[in-house]
Image (cartoon, rainbow, N blue to C red):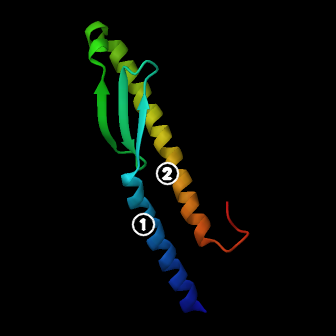
Amino acid sequence: MLDGLMGKMQEAQQKMEEAKLKLNDIILTEQSSRSEVIIKITANKEIKDISLNENFLKDVDKEELEDLLINTVNSAIKQAEQKSEIEMQSIAGTMLPPGMGF
C-alpha cells in the first residue's frame, strides 16, 4: 500500500512538472486600451515580446508611455496567473479520485 501511495505521489509530481513546462508554450497577448502597447507573455509569466505602436510613439511623452507599460504589463501578468491557475487545477483534478475535483 505504501509503495502504491509513493508511486501515485511520484506520478503526481511528474504531471505537475509536465504542466509547468506546458505553461511555457501557452502565449497570451495583452494590449492597452487603444493598442498602443502589446505584450506577449507565457502562462509562466515570462514576457516574450513588447510592441509599441509607431504612430503612438510620435505623440507620447515619457510619463504616459511608462504608465501604459506598467498597466499593460500588470494586466498581462494577471492574465498569465489566471491561465496558469486554470491549467494547474485541470491537472490536479485529473489526479484526484472521482468526486474530489475542484
Residue lying at the far right of the rendered structure: 99
Task: Please give the name of the residue rendered at 36% of the width and 37% of the height, measured from the top-left corner.
Answer: 40
Q: Is residue 26 left or right of residue 85?
A: left
Residue 8 placement: quadrant: bottom right
Which sits in the foreground, 67 or 19?
Answer: 19
Q: 10 Å neighbourhood of mark 1: few (<14), some, or many (≥20)?
A: few
Q: Quadrant of the N terminus?
A: bottom right
Q: Provide the residue designation for mark 2.
A: 84
Task: Please give the name of the residue rendered at 29% of the width and 36% of the height, measured from the top-left corner.
Answer: 49
Q: 10 Å neighbourhood of mark 2: few (<14), some, or many (≥20)?
A: many
Task: Name above or below for residue 43 compared with residue 95.
Answer: above
Label 2, secondary structure: give it.
Answer: helix
Q: Quadrant of the C terminus?
A: bottom right
Q: How many marks?
A: 2
Task: Please give the name of the residue rendered at 30% of the width and 9% of the height, measured from the top-left corner.
Answer: 61
Task: Please give the name of the residue rendered at 52% of the width and 55% of the height, measured from the top-left corner.
Answer: 87
Q: CA distance from mark 1 to mark 2?
A: 13 Å
| Amino acid type assigned to the residue bearing label 1 in the image | Glu
Residue 48 position within the rendered picture, expressed as x and y whole percent measured from the top left = 30, 41
Label 1, secondary structure: give it.
Answer: helix
| Amino acid type assigned to the residue bearing label 2 in the image | Ser
Q: Provide the residue designation for mark 1.
A: 17
